[in-house]
Image (cartoon, rainbow, N blue to C red):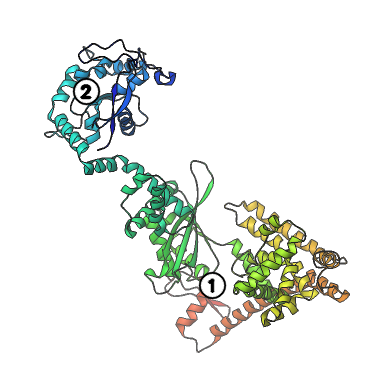
Amino acid sequence: MKHHHRYHFLFNADEHPEKGQTPPSVQPAPVSPSLLDTPAGCNSVNPSPILVEESSTSTFMTETETLNLIHKMFPDKHIHNYHSCRKNGCGSLSVKELGRIDMEKSGQKKKDRFQHDWLLRKNISFSEETGMWWALYVEGEGIHCLLCRKHHSKANQNKSETFSAKPSTRFKLSTLNDHAASSKHKVTVKNEMLNRVSIFQQQIDEKELVKNDVLEKAFYSIYWLAKEAIANRKLPSLLSLIQLLGVTEMKYFTYRSATSIREMFNTPGNGIRDEITTQITNQPYGLMVDDVADISNEEQMVGFIQYIDRNTNNVECKFLFSSNVLEKADSANAEAMYDVIKGNLQSAGIPLDDMRGLATDGASAMTGKNNGLAAIIKKDVPMMISVHCICHKLALACTDTNKDLKKIKDAEVEVTQLWKVFDNSPKKLSVYLKIQQEMKAVYLEARISNKISRRLKKACATRWLSFDKAIDAVCFDLPAILQTLRQLKGDPACYGLLKKFSKAKKIGTLYILHAVLPILSKLSKAFQQGTINFSTIEPCISHTKDQLLELAKENAINAPVKKLLEDTKDGILSTTEIRCSENDVQYLQKLLHWENYRKVRNDTITLVRESKKKFIGNLQKSLANKNTTPSNWWKITKDVLNINNKSSPIPPLKFEDSFIQHPFD
């Protein structure tokens, strides 16, 4: 049986009264001033003698347990109860509450007022069976019964919840006496006594009491897992850890099946989506979509929505949906992606007609002139503007330039090969890290050198900033890389890379890339900001071009080449065998010269123009060909005239300086 406490008066140690004798005068124990703090607006009274607790096997609730129960049932409320008022020295309702009651009963002839001393009278507010002072008054509401509130009691006949879920506002002494004598209250007293002797009922009551706290802690755990990108199947393990650390009420959280966990993870997401939907109602928005493959190799379309927050007047970009494109389609074509977007917008209650912008990666399935995703959406929303992501455009421009400049492309391939050598072999990686630490220990303390050990990065054409990071990692530790390759030269791959990276021309190319790529990365990061001011785009591009032209100055040794000469003479490469000859300097100067890039640019533009000219010539030949069928001829004509509507009238034809009009026009 659980031990509870009872109270007795504190007497002097040498004055124990005999049985049947009257006890001596009570000597109150010292009272802390904080216990006598009176709530604002309440009249203070002299506190009764302080009670002390004594261990007992009684089933009665202690004062502390009763106050905790009241606090959980009525959080942040101004409560008047036997225990709370004795503890705080409270003798009446607050002035504010008395004024409220007078105002509500101003039209009544006889004004009934709640008498505070009713709470302190044992024959009114005390239950002999349970040992509880059940009557309490909540300011701003009325009278409650602590027992009926705890058990959610209802009247048998009319299902009234007065004194339990609803307060009583009939401030008469007979109201309290009638409630104490009612069948609802008596049944509640029996249930309370049954609960105290049944361990199972105690667990049920405790579970009911803490269910809201348990759910709150569970959803906080779910939110943390989502924010940290941790698998949702880790939730039961996390909850078990929380329970082990002292939050014992988590044992009552029983929704731990995979289906329940999935639903709980979706619940916060649906709530966030509803907030976004409320903000977007009756205002235009933009959509950013991309088609990617997830870790399970499923084709996913990810969508973000951009809109103006009505509360802050700021542009917001929020995640909206992620859907499997191939769930209801055989191919991830434009029609399938259109169905996914339309379905997700409809489920969120967002009108398709309010879409004003669509940002994509520029793939043909997205931006195709006739059958692309943007073209299909424009049939429903003619005002929609399709935008090719500027970050994708910059990345594609850099990638295409590398293909035309063989030396730069070779450097990218060799840096990737260098990364694969160490990434695919733990033994080689261990050798590299040890050599890296040994070489740094010459200049730095061991504690610091352990922290600055770095691994090589992978250069990937589809990752915008990866090439910059890969070149930076190689240039940061060139001596350690060369020493590692020299030590592992028995391996054919390492020997081949050592021969390449031991040449001044190759190292100089890396130095040039190390100077150029951060400038382009800075521009890309400026474009990747959540919101961008269109007035800043042109200055950013102009500044980037000026910086690149500064590196390619004529009649002077460029900064990257100058740094290479300094490093090979007295810098980090002075301990290696790399030396720069006059021919090497001229080669690197020519590689960095602007004329090379201008030639590539002009060749590319010429190629595009010739391709367009050739395409138009082929169309003209097809129209003049007598073997072209009427349907194909009309299809080619619509492409030339940019006619997309099938119901467009047939344009007039010119024949021998005269126009032939269609007879039905």
The quadrant where residue 24 appears: top left
Q: Is residue 92 above or below residue 485?
A: above
- In percent of width and height, residue 117 lies at 26, 15
Q: Is residue 292 above or below residue 351?
A: below
Q: Residue at x 79, y 76 (%)?
A: 503
Mark closer to the chain start, 2 or 1: 2
| Disc 1: CA contacts within 10 A as few (<14), some (14-19) or many (>=20) | few
**Number of the front mark, 2 or 1:** 2
- In percent of width and height, residue 250 lies at 35, 47
Asked if labels 1 and 2 touch by Cβ distance under 8 angstroms, the answer is no
The three-letter amino acid code for the residue at tag 1 is Leu
Residue lying at the far bottom in this picture: please name it.
Answer: 627
- In percent of width and height, residue 448 lies at 70, 55
- In percent of width and height, residue 151 lies at 22, 35
| Disc 2: CA contacts within 10 A as few (<14), some (14-19) or many (>=20) | some
Q: CA distance from mark 2 to mark 1?
A: 94 Å
Which circle marks residue 641 in the picture?
1
Q: Is residue 22 visible?
A: yes
Q: Quadrant of the C terminus?
A: bottom left
Please give the count of numbered marks on the rendered protein: 2
State left or right for residue 69 relative to residue 272: left
Q: Quadrant of the N terminus?
A: top left
Q: Mark 2 sits on what residue?
A: 126
Q: Nearer the viewer, residue 194 or 318?
A: 194
Q: Is residue 139 visible?
A: no
Q: Find numbered disc 2 in the image and state the secondary structure of the residue it sits on.
A: strand
The quadrant where residue 162 appears: top left
